[in-house]
């Protein structure tokens, strides 16, 4: 469903839509595994992806951008669906994680879910400009921006 969101949007509606998608993704695939991997600081991949999802919606609403809510939610929740611990010190690819994890996340997501082109674009291009090809749809741009905001907060404002 394509939505035009204003600032007076019903918060409960968005929370229910996010939860409905989480329930479906956990039932159909391995989303719950992301709770066991750390992303930034002490924040799990699951918590990070949920924060990116909420932040993406807030940005879209603030800027009054038309977007596909389902694609935005699913893409945001799956954008870091790489399913491994990238902090393992003896992994030689650790330093390159930022460059190649979008492809791994997309590959894993395609194994578990049927994804729209927008959802695939969100996952594949959320690390732009590290990934050379920029996002192709507004939902992917929203997640790309929200991911940077949330990663910055998680890295700089570590929870104790």
Image: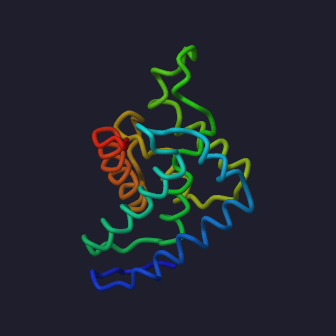
Looking at the image, which is closer to me, 40 or 78? Answer: 40
Q: How far from the left and from the top, in percent, is residue 91? A: 57, 17
Relative side of 44 to 9, left or right: right
Relative side of 51 to 18, left or right: left
User: Where on the picture, by quarter, is residue 93?
Assistant: top right
Q: How many numbered discs sit on the rendered protein?
A: 0
Look at 43% across and 46% down and name the residue there: 126
Looking at the image, which is closer to me, 16 or 137? Answer: 16
Q: How far from the left and from the top, in percent, is residue 147? A: 38, 49
Look at 63% across and 58% down and name the residue there: 115
Look at 28% across and 75% down and name the residue there: 64
Question: Which quadrant is the C terminus positioned in?
Answer: top left
Looking at the image, which is closer to me, 157 or 16? Answer: 157
User: Where on the picture, by quarter, is residue 7?
Assistant: bottom left
User: Where on the picture, by quarter, is residue 157?
Assistant: top left
Relative side of 130 to 104, left or right: left
Render colour scheme: rainbow
Q: How far from the left and from the top, in percent, is residue 50? A: 48, 58
Q: How far from the left and from the top, in percent, is residue 34? A: 60, 46
Q: Residue furthest front?
A: 160
Look at 35% across and 50% down and name the residue there: 150
């Amino acid at each position: 469903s394509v939505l035009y969101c204003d600032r007076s949007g019903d918060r409960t509606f968005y929370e229910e839509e996010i939860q409905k998608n989480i329930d479906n993704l956990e039932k159909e695939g391995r989303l719950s595994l992301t709770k066991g991997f750390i992303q930034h600081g002490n924040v799990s991949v699951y918590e990070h992806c949920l924060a990116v999802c909420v932040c993406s919606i807030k940005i879209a609403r603030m800027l009054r951008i038309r977007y596909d809510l389902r694609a935005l939610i699913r893409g945001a929740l799956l954008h870091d669906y790489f399913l491994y611990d990238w902090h393992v010190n003896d992994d030689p690819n650790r330093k390159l994680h930022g460059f190649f994890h979008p492809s791994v996340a997309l590959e894993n997501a395609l194994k578990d879910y049927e994804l729209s082109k927008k959802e695939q674009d969100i996952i594949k291009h959320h690390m732009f400009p590290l990934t050379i090809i920029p996002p192709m749809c507004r939902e992917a741009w929203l997640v790309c921006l929200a991911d940077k905001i949330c990663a910055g907060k998680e890295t700089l404002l570590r929870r104790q």
